[in-house]
Image: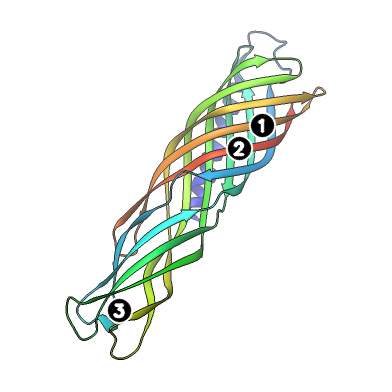
Amino acid sequence: MKQTNRLLTALVGGLSLLLAATSAPAQDDDVGEDRWYIGVGAGILSTSDAPAGTFSFDNSLFGSEQGEFDADYSADDDAVLELSAGVRLGDGPFGLGVTWSQSSPSASAEIVGRLPHPFFFDTLRTVEGTQGNLTRDETAIHLSFRWLVRDGQKTDLTLFVGPSQIELEHDLVAAVRFDQTYPFDEATYAGTHRELASGDAIGYHLGIDIVRKFGNTVGVGGVVRYSQAGIDLDGPDGSSVSVDAGGLTATVDLRFRF
């Protein structure tokens, strides 16, 4: 709930900036046409990074020793939903925009575990496996400074750049489950225990926006944006896991202009 409130605060703040921009006196009374836009769209997010590291864990079968495992995570490309709004400042080529985006790619982890022997010190048994169906949810607010490069009768071309707030929730493997039988010289991988970690950070984004106009108020937009924010997640053993959230996004939206 605390993270959601932060996102809502960022969204309200971005919209407040847009409203403040439009409240300033215009130099030309004719500047209102096609000044605002609202967009609803969807597309594909290719994530830029996935965490990896070595972690320790306890088990009563290990005695006084600890087990450890390597976790190498990966995430698939995933659908992204977006809502956007923007305003042109005065009669020049510059404007402001704000975009909310959300995606939930499917994540997995390759696991290599090293398990202490229950009878002998400094004797490790190695198990390997894959943990799928891990949660990875990204929610972002992008505040954009926009430059209208081409203002055509049928097509607009805009470049944009600005800060991004990205929140990430990610399942992290906390411990390795295993099976063993006497004399316990070998063990087999039996899955993992997981913990949901979350974090947020301010990063940046940049991109290009092309709009094909149909009539006076409706258009179809295509947006390509790269975003990145370095987020530190709390690892299962108290360590920190660094993730570059964001990535390359390509979306198509329905654009309303007024």
Q: Amino acid at mark 3?
A: Asn
Question: Badges 3 and 2: C-beta atoms under 8 Å apart?
Answer: no
| Tally of numbered tags | 3
Question: Badges 2 and 1: C-beta atoms under 8 Å apart?
Answer: yes
SS state under label 1: strand
Crowding at mark 1 (Cα within 10 Å: few <14, some 14-19, many 20+): some
**Left or right placement of residue 89 versus residue 111 in this view:** right
Q: Earlier in the sequence, mark 2 or mark 1?
A: 1
Pointer 2 residue: 250
Q: Earlier in the sequence, mark 1 or mark 3?
A: 3
Percent position of residue 204, x then y: 45, 34
Q: Is residue 15 visible?
A: no
Picture layout, residue 235 above or below residue 3: below
Percent position of residue 100, x then y: 58, 41
Alpha carbon distance from label 3 to label 2: 45 Å
* Most foreground residue, 60 or 176: 176
Residue under the point 62% across and 32% down: 223
Residue farthest bottom in this picture: 182
* Quarter of the image with the C terminus in it: top right
Alpha carbon distance from label 2 to label 1: 7 Å
Alpha carbon distance from label 1 to label 3: 52 Å
* Most foreground residue, 118 or 1: 118
Pointer 1 residue: 222
Numbered mark located on residue 59 in the image:
3
Q: Is residue 92 visible?
A: yes
Q: Amino acid at mark 2?
A: Ala
Residue under the point 30% across and 79% down: 59
Picture layout, residue 132 above or below residue 116: above
Q: Amino acid at mark 1?
A: Gly
